[in-house]
Image: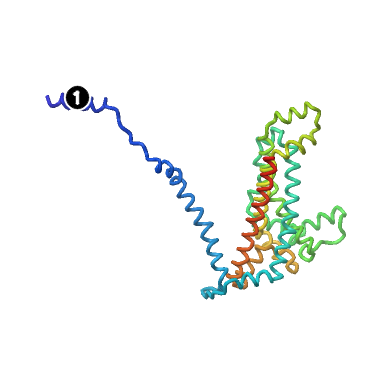
Amino acid sequence: MSIATTNNGRAASAARPRIYRRRSPLRRKLFPYLLVLPAVAYLLGITLYPGIYAMVQSLYRVKFNSWTFIGLDNYEKLFADPEFWASLWNTLVIGASALALEFVIAMTLAAFAYRDPWVRGWRIIFLLPMLFMPSAVSFIWKLAFNDGGVVSDLLMGIGVIGSPLDFLGNVWLARLSLVITDVWQWTPFLFIIFVAALQSQDMEIEEAARLDGARWSQIFWNISLPLIAPIVAVALVLRGIDIVTMFTSVFIITGGTPGGATETVSYFIYRTGFKRFDFGYASAASVVVLVATVILAQTFVKRFFKSGRD
């Protein structure tokens, strides 16, 4: 009798519909944020904290464990420092040259290759220079330009020059060595983005223009390029930010020579902090470069996204 009663109770409870309690509107709104909270906390820990620490440190004269509050003296000294302005100029010259060459080469190759099915299957080949460590690439090009004299020997062999070139003794040759190093390694980054952007556009627009008698060059300049302008802007900003932080190739290939003509702002900050041990001054330079980079990047991207919408 008790067994039958128990079975009947279980059957009744199984037949009874379960009642699910709905989350409150506040919990539903907070749930997505709780899911991304660990990632956001991690990113803030590795980005926000060092930035705040550098801003605080820039207000002090720091010599190892000795911190002396000096207010904005580091910034006043920085804006009057000719070495700092020279490093900014070097970064602009080297970075603008490298970025311009990378853009022209990558866009030209992408324009010819984005319709080729071979590119779709072998994109990894174009990324090979990016897969090498920047230090290894810098040592290879240092051997080619300076230590081994490979470039000079090749130019002499084909009769372009009559004597070996001293890449570290000439301002423009030293800068050229850094530009070539950067172009060789990072042009594939822009190339693969441009190819993906061109392949993702609506091909029916191109077909319509072709049926109307437009040439390939007209289609590319008047249709394809304006359509991918926002993507191009983001890619150039990413490369520009990376170029501002150019350090490895300068440290290995030129060391800032000759006469500081290849000393970029990143190398200036390194030399100030780790050779002069003036960490507060180096932090002030880092903060100024960070603020200037963010303002320029934001302005550039906004302008291109606005033109893309128009």
Q: Is residue 235 above or below residue 68?
A: above
Q: Which residue occupies 47% across, 46% down?
A: 36
Q: Which residue occupies 66% across, 66% down?
A: 268
Placement of the N terminus among the 4 image quadrants: top left
Res 248 → quadrant: bottom right
Residue 309, x across and y down, in percent = 67, 40
Placement of the C terminus among the 4 image quadrants: top right
Tell which of 64 and 122 is nearer to you: 64
User: Can residue 37 be seen in this snapshot?
Assistant: yes
Tell which of 80 and 105 is nearer to you: 80
Residue 237, x across and y down, in percent = 66, 50
Look at label 1 and name its amino acid. Answer: Asn
Q: Which residue occupies 66% across, 39% down?
A: 123
Question: How packed is label 1: few (under 14 Cα within 10 Å), some, or many (20 or more)?
Answer: few
Q: Is residue 146 above or below residue 230?
A: below
For this view, does 68 lie left or right of residue 89?
left
Tell which of 227 and 103 is nearer to you: 227
Q: Secondary structure at mark 1?
A: helix
The residue labelled by disc 1 is 8
Res 157 → quadrant: bottom right
